[in-house]
Amino acid sequence: MFKGRAWKADRFGDPETVLQIGTDIWEEPPPGSVLVKVAACGLGLPDKFMTEGRYPIVATPPVKPGQEVSGRVVSVPSGSAFRTGERVMGITLYGDGWWRGGLADYAFVQERKCLRVPDSMTDESAAGFTIGFRTAHAGLIERVPVACGQRILVLGAAGSSGAAAICLSKALGCEIFALASSEDKRRFCQSIGADHVFDYRQEGWVEAVMDATQGHGIDVIFDPVGGSTAKQALATLAPAARIALIGFASGTWLDLDAQDMVLRNYSAIGVFSGGFSAEEESQAYARLERMARDGEITTPLGNVFEFEKAGEAICLLETPGPGKTVVRVAEGSPGLFGS
Ligand SMILES: NC(=O)c1ccc[n+]([C@@H]2O[C@H](COP(=O)([O-])OP(=O)(O)OC[C@H]3O[C@@H](n4cnc5c(N)ncnc54)[C@H](OP(=O)(O)O)[C@@H]3O)[C@@H](O)[C@H]2O)c1
């Protein structure tokens, strides 16, 4: 049995009000998961939504946020592919409802969604690696897939999925066109590999993208945003282009027009990173683990918060800064840990 701190909300509401640090107990990991002593925890918008009661798979409180973590394995079920002491990163156990997130001293990590951390990777980078890159891999490698030299337009490019898509498509040899709302975010996109950046809030950005492609147009759009930005982006598509539908950060999905798709010969491809077989998932994670080990991809890390500031970090997730938001967990009060 392990005891430690955990962020938890006993009722839905404003994260800054309802989230509190308490103590919790972790028993041995259930089959298919490992127990990890958490070093850092990666956050995403679902953490805010579930705390507020706006996330369908968390129908009732209590809420324990924290989608992904890095840390060391402290306990495994028999037959596990992992050993205690191994440094890992992965997605926490929330399949039956978000009942035990990673914003805590310990967390259960799903074995199928657990990777070994390369020695060169920091705990903070490892905590923000899995979800973003798994999503980008699902879109750009498994579902579309993109080819070296293709022109990729990334929407929401400074966000968690978008920034990972920039890093991955750079590693695949693509030319990257990135959309972001602020100078700060556009500089961040360039720093992680975007070749061209645009402010989608400025009139004329569609024409600017077309000019930057010398009139050829975009081969693949990676769209975690939807809404009117994605609708406008369709005008940049080259013949026989594809759009990967990832999400709706704008609040609405892209509204597709079948007639336009037919007349301009483009396709839309739905992408759900959780929708693959165990074998496909294992191949995807093996490839991502190798790319990270070889230094081909690195987490596009954004703001890093201390454990005590995690409530504040969750409040900021609806208007996040550039890159992946991470909370440092390990440097808290080690005296609380016990077994
Ligand atoms: N399909 C899957 O498997 C999968 C996996 C993970 C996430 N998702 C979904 O993908 C979406 C994004 O997730 P995320 O984690 O990347 O979110 P995120 O880190 O919050 O990033 C979203 C980005 O979207 C941009 N944005 C917001 N409203 C916009 C608008 N109206 N027009 C243009 N850009 C806008 C924001 O940047 P600006 O400041 O530049 O506007 C922000 O950086 C969510 O809907 C999520 O559920 C899907």
Image (spheres, rainbow, N blue to C red):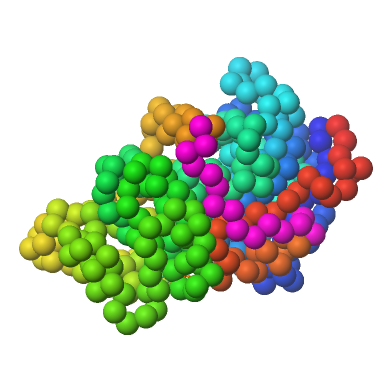
Write the residue at 38% across / 47% down. 169
Q: Is residue 191 above or below residue 111?
A: below
User: Magenta stretch: residue 305 in it?
Assistant: yes
The percent position of residue 312, horizontal first and vertical second, equals: 71, 67
Q: Nearer the viewer, residue 60 or 66?
A: 66
Q: Is residue 45 left or right of residue 214?
A: right
Q: Residue furthest bottom?
A: 203
Q: Is residue 175 above or below residue 337?
A: below
Q: Residue 77's quadrant in the figure?
A: top right
Q: Is residue 231 above or below residue 41?
A: below
* Span highlighted in magenta in the image: 294-308
Q: Nearer the viewer, residue 229 or 118?
A: 118
- Residue 11 appears in the rendering: no
Please tell me how many numbered marks the rendered image carries.
Answer: 0
The percent position of residue 66, horizontal first and vertical second, equals: 64, 51
The percent position of residue 159, horizontal first and vertical second, equals: 49, 61
Write the residue at 43% across / 64% down. 156
